[in-house]
Image: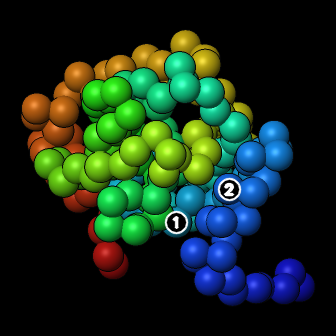
Amino acid sequence: MPRKITIDKAVMMEEIRTLVSDGKTVSLTVRGNSMNPMIVDRRDSMTLGPWKDSDLRRGCVALVRDKRGEYLIHRIIHRNGNQLTLLGDGNIRITEKADIDDVIAIMHSLERKGRTITTDSILWKTYSWAWMFLEPVRRWPLGLWRRLFLRQD
């Protein structure tokens, strides 16, 4: 039987920062619903890794420590110099702010139901573009998705 270890979130995130700054990648099982329906809680896992400045553009999914000191994995929706605005795919309007220095890692791939989808694939880029395009009317597809798949029976 696998052993379950609980680690303080801040400690884990700083360890990820150290590994990524050494050029390594880290795989995490997704926890939380803020990136639904694109990335699903406890079903999907993502590989996070190093980034360069040019990677931090609209559509990139990044692990950051935001201005409030919270760690989150959200999509960059706007960049103004060193200032990033992020929005979870499962959110309608709530955005977070972070500086480039607050970026810990970016998502390089997603594993879903045994299939790996890289962020440079046509599938992921199309998926991301379509979801970002729907941002003004996102409440309706999100509401439908939540009713169909997040039911608490």
Q: Name the residue under label 2.
A: 17
> Mark 1, residues whose alpha carbon is within 10 Å: few (<14), some, or many (≥20)?
some
Which residue is pictured at 32% across the width and 22% down the height?
A: 130
Number of numbered tags placed on the structure image: 2
Would you say the residues marked 2 and 1 are in contact, meaning their CB atoms lie under 8 Å apart?
A: no
In which quarter of the view is residue 151 placed? bottom left
Compared to residue 149, the image places residue 142 above or below, namely above
Q: In this view, does 131 lie to the left or right of 74?
A: left
Q: Which of marks 2 and 1 is nearer the N terminus?
A: 2
Q: Residue furthest right?
A: 1
Compared to residue 125, the image places residue 80 above or below, namely below
Q: Which amino acid does label 1 sit on?
A: Arg
Q: Tag 1's secondary structure?
A: loop
Q: Position of residue 94 (x, y in %)?
A: 18, 54
> Mark 2, residues whose alpha carbon is within 10 Å: few (<14), some, or many (≥20)?
many
Between 144 and 54, which is closer to the camera in this rendering?
54
Q: Where is residue 134 in the image (x, y as percent from the top left)?
A: 20, 28
**Which quarter of the rendered picture does the C terminus lie within?**
bottom left
Which residue is pictured at 75% across the width and 57% down the height?
A: 18
Can residue 17 be seen by looking at this rendering? yes
Q: Position of residue 2 (x, y in %)?
A: 86, 81
Q: What residue type is labelled 2?
A: Arg
Q: Mark 1 points at which residue?
A: 31
Using the image, tell me which numbered label, if any, was put on residue 100: none
Q: Which residue lies furthest to the top in this view?
A: 122
Q: In this view, does 59 lie to the left or right of 68?
A: right
Q: Position of residue 115 (x, y in %)?
A: 70, 36
Q: Distance between the residues labelled 2 and 1?
A: 18 Å
Q: Tag 2's secondary structure?
A: helix
